[in-house]
Image: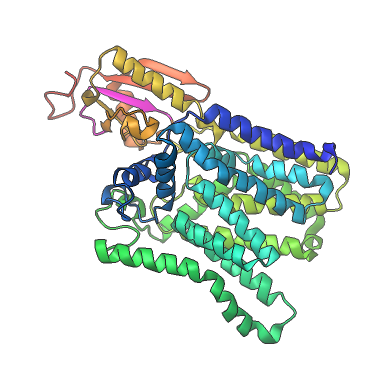
Amino acid sequence: MDLKRKIPYITGLLLVSVLFVVTSENGFFWDTVQLGSEHAAFFLSTDFARLLLPDSIDSGHIPAFGFYLGLAWKLFGRSLLVSHIAMLPFVAGILWQLSRLVGRFIPQKYSGWAFLMILADPTVLSQMTLMSPDVPLMFFFLMGVNAVLENKRTRLSAAVAFLFLTSMRGMMVATALFAADITKNIFMTDRPGHRIQLFLKRLVIYLPAILIFLSYNGYHFLVKGWIGFHKDSPWATLFERVPLSGMAYNAGIIVWRLVDFGRAGIWILFLYLLLRYGRKIFRNDDIRFQLYLFLLVTALLSLSMVWAKNLLCHRYLLPAYISFSLLSATILFTSDAGRGFKTAGIAFWMVMLLAGNFWVYPEKIATGWDATLAHLPYYSLRKEAIDYLDKKSIDFNGVQSFFPDISSIDDFDLNGDHRKFSDFDNTSRYVLYSNVFNISDADYDIVKKDFSVVRHFRKGLVYVDVCRRNTDLPAGITHLPGD
C-alpha cells in the first residue's frame, strides 16, 4: 500500500492517539463511575476474594470489566493513568479489527477512508476516551464479525464468551453474531443436506459463553435470589415496564439515536445511493450480509431497550452504528458512482460526523453526553467548581447535586478524597449543577427558580454552576445544612 493510501489510516491512529494524550488524566464519567471505578474498588478492597458485588452497585452484569480494572490497579497502582492505559489493548484491538473488516469489503483505494469514516463516529470516539466496558464490547463485536466472515471457530468462541462477560448487552450482541454465523456458515453454504449436522457441530462454539452465563447467574441467584435486577435495586426505576404506547415512543427515540450526532449525514447518503442504484446494490452478497447484520444487531439491541422506561442510552447502540457505517461505506465505494461523487461523499460524511460533536440540545431535552466529544470540558470545570467550594470553605454537607456527580470525589478522580455531594432533594443551601446532568424537568425548574448562580464555570458547550438558595426555604423546612 502506497503512502497516499495510508494517510487515512495514519490520520485515524493520530486522532485516537491525541485523544488518549489529552484525556489520560480525565476521571470516570457517567455510568463508568459505577461500572468501572466502584466495581474495581470493591474487588481491590476485598483482594478479589468475592465474586458478587454489593447490591448497591450490582446492576446485574457479570462484573468482569471491574475485575479487570481492579487487577490493573493491583499490579500497577490505582491511578487514572493506569486506568486509561488499561483500555489501550481494547482500543488497539478496535483499530486492528476495523482495519481488517474494511479491507475485506472496500476496494484498497478507498479502504483507508472507510476506516477513518467509521472511526469518526462521535459515540465511538467518545467511548474510546472513557474507561468504559463498551470499549471491550466494541472490540469483541468486531473480532466476532471477522471470525464469522473467516469461519474461525476458536476466535468466534472467544469473542462470544468475552461479550457475555462485558454486559447483558454484550449477550444480545453475541446472539446477533450467533444468528449471523448460522446464516453465513450453514445456510449460505453449498451443503444443504448437512445443515442440521453442521448446526449441531457449530453449537460447540457457543458452549463456553453459555457455561459462563449459567455458572455466574446460577450462583448469583442462589446467593441473592435475583438475576438482572430486583424491585429494591437502585436502578429499579430504569427497568419499569412501559405500555404499548411507551414502547412506540421508545422506538421513536431509538430511531433518533441512530441519526443523532451527525449520523443523519450517513443516512442521507445511504438513502440517496439506494434511490439512485436501487436493487442493483443488493445483488452484492457482501452488502446483503452487512444489511442482515445491521438489522440483526439493531433489532436485538432495540428489543432489550424498548420495553423499559429508561434504557435508551446512545452507547447501547454502538454495534448498530458501526454496522450501518460499514454497510453505507461499502455501498458508496463499490457503487458505480464516479470518483468526484465518492470524494464528495467522504467530505459530507466527515463534516457531518465532526459537526455532530457540537449537537447539544436545549437543557430540557436529554443529550447523550458520554456519546459525544462535547463532554470533554466537564472534567476540568468540575475540578474548578470543587476548588471554588474549598476556597470559600463551603461544607460539602450543605451541597447537593445530581447523577453522575453524587459518588465520592475519589470514585471519580482516584485521589483519596472521599467527600461527596448528596443527591438533590431540595433541602440544601447549595447546589452544584451542570448541563451534562440531564435532570428531570421538575428538578431543573426548582434549581432555576429557587437558586441563584454564585459562580459560573464554562468551557465550550459545557458549564458547571455553583448555586446558592434564594431567601425562601422549602415548605416545612426551617433549617438547612450549611447554615
Quadrant containing the N terminus in the rendered view = top right
Q: As rendered, which of 370 and 158 lies closer to the eye?
A: 158
Q: In this picture, is 4 found above or below 106?
A: above
Q: Is residue 348 visible?
A: no
Number of labelled discs? 0
Residue at image x 84%, y 42%? 341
Quadrant containing the C terminus in the rendered view = top left
Measured from the top left, where is residue 451 in percent x and y? 29, 21
- Quarter of the image for residue 7 reads top right
Report the magenta residues as a range: 423-435
Q: Is residue 209 visible?
A: yes
**Residue 43 shown left or right of residue 422 in the figure:** right
Q: In this picture, is 112 found above or below 294?
A: above
Magenta stretch: includes residue 139? no
Q: In this picture, is 389 found above or below 83?
A: above
Q: As rendered, which of 286 and 433 lies closer to the eye?
A: 286
Q: Residue furthest front?
A: 75
Measured from the top left, where is residue 243 in percent x and y? 38, 60
Residue at image x 51%, y 45%? 314
Q: As rendered, which of 14 and 77 lies closer to the eye?
A: 77
Q: As rendered, which of 351 and 65 lies closer to the eye?
A: 65
**Residue 238 shown left or right of residue 157 in the figure:** left
Measured from the top left, where is residue 118 in percent x and y? 67, 45
Residue at image x 67%, y 60%? 291
The colour scheme used here is rainbow
Measured from the top left, where is residue 88 in percent x and y? 56, 41
- Quarter of the image for residue 70 reads top left
